[in-house]
Image (spheres, grey):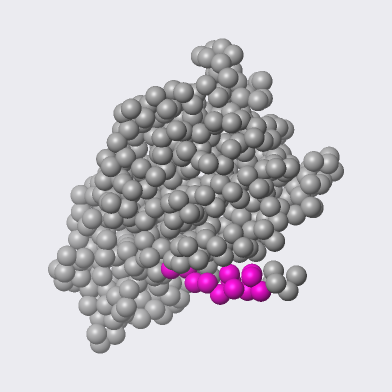
Amino acid sequence: MIGRNQQLQRLHRRRVPTWWRDAKLGIMVHWTPASVPAFAPVDVEIGELLRSSGPDALASSPYSEWYENSLRFPDSPVARHHREVYGDRPYAEFAKDWEAGLEHWDPDEWARRFARTGARYVVFVAKHADGYCLWPTGVTNPRRPGWNCARDVVGEFGEAVRAAGMRFGIYYCGGFDWTFDDRPIGSMADVVAAIPRGDYPAYAEAQVRELITRYRPSVLWNDVAWPATGRRLWPLFEDYYAQVPDGVVNDRWLPWNPALAAARWGPVRGLIDAGSRRAAQRDGGLVPPIPPHFDVRTPEYVSFSEPQPFAWEGVRGMDHSFGYNASSRPEDFVTRDDLLGQFVDIVATGGNLLLNVGPRGVDAQIPDEQLTRLDWLGAWLELHRDAITATQPWVTRGATTDQGPVCFTARDDTVFGFLSGAAGWTTIPGLQATPSTTVRTLAGAPRPWRDQQSGLAIEVPASSADAGPTVVAIRGVAATRPGVMR
């Protein structure tokens, strides 16, 4: 016990590396055999399902990468779609179509597109819950031998990402592998019960160690939970940090403990589901439980409303799914204003945005709707990078002006204000001028301003209708009411 505690203490002394804190924008890529059928219902968001008390709510998951699980519920939208389109074709056969699509794949082009957004790191799904591996693993799956790609997709993409000047991270779904445990997952109690036992923990650890040794990922991003106890997990972390000293692990590494086995008992299942619903109602969506060790928290399709005492990234897709969903309608995709607004809000509260891309499985192409949103981010960030990259939250997150909300970031003695609303004079409450105060655009042009009892008034320049938030750089300003947006 003492040794394990000492290991945890050493892990807790680690600091999140500067490169990650300064990045502000990362890209995640979900691209699996489920990207071939590419179907999920579009009339519900994941947060609604997590708050729902309906039976087997997750059978209607909007995540297309959960296609195989949804298929196990005979009356689910996915099962009905599959019968109509594919008959009785087994899910595993989609891997052949996915592999055939690699003929059209250009990893360098993907990396260039991601780099143009201003992203500093990319997290690539190496194995999702269906268990299919996107690299020629040397760890044999005892339940489905050969359930992996012969081509080293992970390695090729890692080289392309690094050549484009970004950090490369790897996602591994340690909490699920449906080749080891294929019970239908309809609720959060099922999520806990479906974490495989038996020979799976050793298999998962061997694969993660293989990924670390072979690819040395700058981010090690696990999902759901970890199937082994902390006694096995802490040495894995220490070995990862030894090989990648400036590496980062996320918060979805809650280690297995014998109490989790109770999730298969009726009364305990009810308690788990009720507690999960309360948490989703409180948080507004999916916020993972806090494990004994993590570097970065990862709320999903929801953000923290205030700066946190830990590093975090807001994780979301461009529509309601992470994997490609061919059924998504134009109205299901995040709008330009919402995407830029969420990005700014996340950065102002000290987080990074980890935005997901879901390529098609049949031809390895990124859909136009997603490319458009990457372009939106890239064009805006190119003009406003100084107000985003390597900034920190200011003493107050923001304020409400007569023209609308304003968010703040800061670097050294400069406060960057992200203003929404029309051009003209805007008074920002909670700000007070000092003898050294100046207000400029990011391009360096001075802006008229005046100090008022109600706050700092700034003449906001006109911008085009699709320009996103207007940014001004304010130097030498004091905060008179910290936390005015709290």
Residue 191 position, x and y percent, is: 68, 42
* Residue 386 in sight here: yes
Residue 30 position, x and y percent, is: 45, 39
Query: Is 238 displayed left or right of 51 in the figure?
Result: left
183, 299: nearer the viewer: 183
Residue 212 position, x and y percent, is: 49, 54
Query: Is 360 displayed left or right of 141 in the figure?
Result: left
Furthest residue toward left: 445
Could you tell me how many numbered marks the image carries?
0
Query: Is 114 displayed left or right of 351 in the figure?
Result: left
Q: Which residue is drawn at 56% across and 46% down?
A: 207
Q: Looking at the picture, does residue 179 appear above or below residue 420?
A: above
Q: Which residue is drawn at 28% across and 51% down?
A: 163
Residue 14 magenta: yes
Furthest residue toward front: 138
Residue 97 magenta: no
Query: Within the image, what quadrant is residue 352 found in?
Result: bottom left
Q: Looking at the picture, does residue 459 appear above or below residue 202?
A: below
Q: Residue at x 19, y 56 (%)?
A: 462
428, 409: nearer the viewer: 409
334, 104: nearer the viewer: 104
* Residue 367 in sight here: no
Query: Within the image, what quadrant is residue 436 found in?
Result: bottom left
Q: Looking at the picture, does residue 287 appear above or below residue 68?
A: below
Q: Looking at the picture, does residue 444 appear above or below residue 222?
A: below
Q: Which segment did they paint magenta?
A: 6-17
Quadrant in which the N terminus is drawn: bottom right
Query: Within the image, what quadrant is residue 451 found in?
Result: bottom left
